[in-house]
Each structure stands twice: as C-alpha cells, then as structure tokens.
C-alpha cells in the first residue's frame, strides 16, 4: 500500500488560524521550549537541562522545526568554543501570551484541585 504524500506548505495555507497555531504548538516539548525561551535566550545545553526528559535528538528536531517556522533564531557566536544561542523572533514572542495564559490557568486550577484534595483529606480524617 502506497502512502499519500501531502504538500505541507500547501496544507498550511489552507488551515484556519487555530489549526495553524496548533500545527506549530504541536506537543508538550514545543511548549516547554517556548516557556523557557520566553524568559531569556538560552543555549542548547541550558534548554536540555530545563526541559526535563527530552532527548538531545528530540530537542534538536524541535529547535530546527521552530527555526523553520520563524519562531526562533539560532545565533552562532564566533568564539572558541562556538556558542549557539536560541532567541525568540517577534512571531515567537507573540506565542508568549499563549504560554502565559496556560501558566495562569494551570496555577489557578492546580491550586483549586489541591485545595479540594486537602479538604477531602481533612473530612476523611475527621470522620
């Protein structure tokens, strides 16, 4: 059975805005990379340490994809040893609002769920 080949560039132009955003923010690794780059530019090893559980290969793939999508820029220094820094572009910085909204939502609901769990534990202990 032969697989169908899809022209992703043609597909991207026909996506609705939400679908296009989801295409870029496709997984948790991408969100974690963006989360870390929103605060400041970082090098590969800094990102590797801060994005818990990601392999070097996966981090490299995600960074290349984000660079191709003009979400970040890869800056190579002329020093020895060579230092590579990843910086969000204007397009990437605009995604910071989504990351911050997710952070706020997570903080709000994590606290509410934690409070509910604590209240249930207290009720069980008292009864």
Image: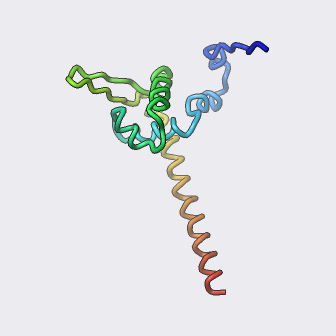
> Which quadrant is the N terminus positioned in?
top right
Q: Residue at x 48, y 20 (%)?
A: 68
The answer to whether 73 is drawn above or below residue 26 in the figure is above
Number of numbered discs overlaid on the protein picture: 0
Residue 125, x across and y down, in percent: 61, 83
Please state, as top left, top right, bottom left or bottom right, where the C terminus lies in the image. bottom right
15 versus 101 height, above or below: above
Compared with 80, 97 (above or below) is below
Give left or right: position of 102 versus 38: right
Residue 28 screen position, x and y as percent: 55, 40
The type of colouring in the image is rainbow
Residue sitting at the far bottom: 127
79 relative to 18 in the view: left or right: left
Judged from this view, the residue extending furthest toward the right is 1
**Residue at the image position 63 percent from the left and 28 percent from the top:** 17
Query: Residue 115 occupies which quadrant of the picture?
Result: bottom right
Give the image location of residue 9, x and y in percent: 61, 15
- Residue at x 48%, y 38% (from the top left corner): 54
Which residue is at 33% across, 33% downward?
43
List x then y, in percent, for residue 88: 40, 30
Question: In this view of the protein, which residue sits in the foreground, 69 or 125?
Answer: 125
Instruction: Say which of 60 and 1 sits in front.
Output: 1
In this orientation, which residue lies closer to the viewer: 86 or 44? 44
């Amino acid at each position: 059975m032969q697989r169908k080949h899809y022209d992703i560039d043609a597909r991207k132009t026909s996506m609705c805005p939400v679908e296009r955003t989801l295409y870029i923010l496709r997984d948790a690794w991408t969100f974690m990379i963006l989360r870390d780059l929103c605060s400041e530019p970082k090098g590969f090893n800094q990102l590797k340490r801060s994005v818990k559980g990601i392999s070097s290969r996966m981090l490299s793939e995600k960074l290349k994809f984000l660079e191709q999508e003009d979400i970040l820029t890869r800056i190579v220094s002329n020093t020895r040893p060579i230092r590579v820094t990843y910086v969000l572009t204007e397009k990437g910085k605009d995604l910071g609002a989504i990351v911050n909204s997710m952070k706020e939502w997570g903080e709000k609901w994590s606290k509410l769920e934690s409070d509910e769990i604590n209240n249930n534990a207290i009720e069980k202990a008292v009864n």
